[in-house]
């Protein structure tokens, strides 16, 4: 049985036999959430066999998380790929969508797909022909240079340009548990399209130079999108490049936690392994499973899935 914390929605395993006699005898049993420390009474009807899935019709709707920040080199692609690879290892079906002309997701996963997001957006191929399997449970809709041409096509549309991606992705929406969308740095029509498609936003923030400025600028841009699309919300701020040997990044991390306590996740520490893994075409779990970076991304996976037993 599983109980869901009413405050932070984290799932915890519960042994029903151990508490049933207390509940049956009319005693109040209370629980403390191991994640947010919230104390709450346990009621029998709060216990569920498995977490309730989000349904659309009778098909399960994927959680659509975009990984984005206008500032370059903050760990967007590294986080998208390793979050995707980890979720896949935890048993979820994941589609990783690369909307960047740099096309690095395929490189990091050691793949050279013949088709990808460009062919999906131009309708040259069917959605299933555009997606390639990268690992068990992990599929890829690759980006690359050809997306530059697609951006021009979107720009020239006179009506509904911002929904181009959402419309093209529709046939894929119900085939996965998670759809992760990596974006390029900067701000363009394709990023606006991503924000009109995703429902959750994950922002990696490098604990290096002026991270808060980039974040507050992004919050303003997100706010302007939310005026037209209320379904999208900021869910996670993931501090990256935390160097525990020096004080500056720790101070920036504390500042972030004070400003955005409900969104800030456990940081991803600075790790040579993360910088090396891409040239071997491997995720961090394949390249250095015992590294601090692997531990940090596993923690992020537990946070995103709200399952404290994932990849333990
Ligand atoms: N925690 C980390 N420790 C050390 N190196 C890292 C870490 N995270 C990412 N890197 C490395 O930093 C570089 C930039 O990371 P990444 O490509 O993920 O950033 P990005 O935000 O996607 O960049 P861009 O804006 O250009 O798309 C890469 O070489 C990556 O391997
Ligand atoms: Mg990138």
Image (cartoon, rainbow, N blue to C red):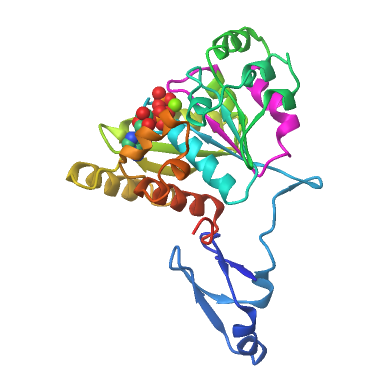
Q: Considering only vertical position in the picture, is 99 above or below 12?
A: above
**Residue 7: x %, y % from top left:** 52, 62
Quadrant of the picture in which ligand 2 is shown = top left
Question: Outermost residue, bottom direction?
Answer: 25
The residue at the point 71 percent across, 36 percent down is 173
Left or right of 174? Residue 311 is: left
Give the vertical position of 206 relative to 130 (above or below): below
At x 65%, y 85%, the residue is 20
Q: Is residue 15 above or below residue 264?
A: below
Is residue 190 on the magenta stretch?
no
Q: Which residues are magenta?
A: 160-189
Place of residue 227 in the rendered image (x, y in percent of width and height, measured from the top left): 56, 31
**Magenta segment includes 181:** yes
Left or right, 157 with respect to 227, comes to: right
Q: Nearer the viewer, residue 107 or 260?
A: 107
Q: Is residue 278 visible?
A: yes
Figure disc tally: 0
Q: Position of residue 172 (x, y in %)?
A: 72, 33
**Percent coordinates x, y for residue 51 in the rendering:** 66, 60
């Amino acid at each position: 049985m599983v109980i869901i914390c009413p405050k932070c929605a984290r799932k915890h395993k519960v042994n029903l036999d151990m508490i049933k006699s207390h509940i049956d005898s009319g005693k109040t049993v209370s629980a403390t959430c191991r994640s947010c420390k919230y104390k709450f009474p346990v009621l029998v009807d709060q216990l569920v066999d498995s977490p309730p899935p989000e349904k659309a019709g009778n098909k399960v709707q994927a959680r659509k998380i975009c990984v984005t920040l206008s500032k370059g080199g903050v760990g967007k692609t590294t986080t998208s790929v390793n979050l995707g690879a980890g979720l896949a290892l935890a048993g979820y079906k994941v589609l990783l969508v690369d909307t960047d002309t740099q096309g690095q997701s395929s490189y990091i996963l050691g793949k050279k797909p013949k088709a990808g997001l460009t062919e999906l957006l131009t309708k040259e191929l069917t959605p299933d022909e555009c997606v390639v399997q990268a690992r068990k449970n992990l599929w890829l809709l690759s980006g690359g240079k050809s997306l530059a041409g697609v951006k021009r096509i979107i720009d020239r549309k006179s009506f509904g340009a911002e929904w181009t991606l959402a419309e093209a992705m529709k046939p894929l929406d119900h085939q996965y548990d998670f759809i992760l969308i990596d974006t390029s740095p900067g701000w363009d029509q394709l990023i606006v399209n991503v924000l009109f498609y995703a429902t959750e936003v994950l922002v990696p923030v490098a604990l290096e130079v002026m991270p808060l400025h980039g974040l507050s600028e992004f919050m303003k841009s997100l706010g302007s999108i939310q005026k037209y699309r209320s379904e999208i919300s900021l869910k996670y701020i993931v501090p990256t490049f935390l160097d525990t040997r020096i004080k500056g990044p720790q101070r920036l991390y504390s500042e972030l936690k004070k400003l955005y306590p409900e969104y800030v996740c456990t940081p991803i520490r600075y790790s040579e392994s993360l910088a090396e893994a891409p040239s071997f075409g491997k995720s961090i779990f394949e390249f250095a499973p015992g590294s601090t970076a692997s531990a940090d991304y596993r923690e992020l996976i537990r946070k995103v899935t709200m399952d404290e037993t994932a990849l333990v």
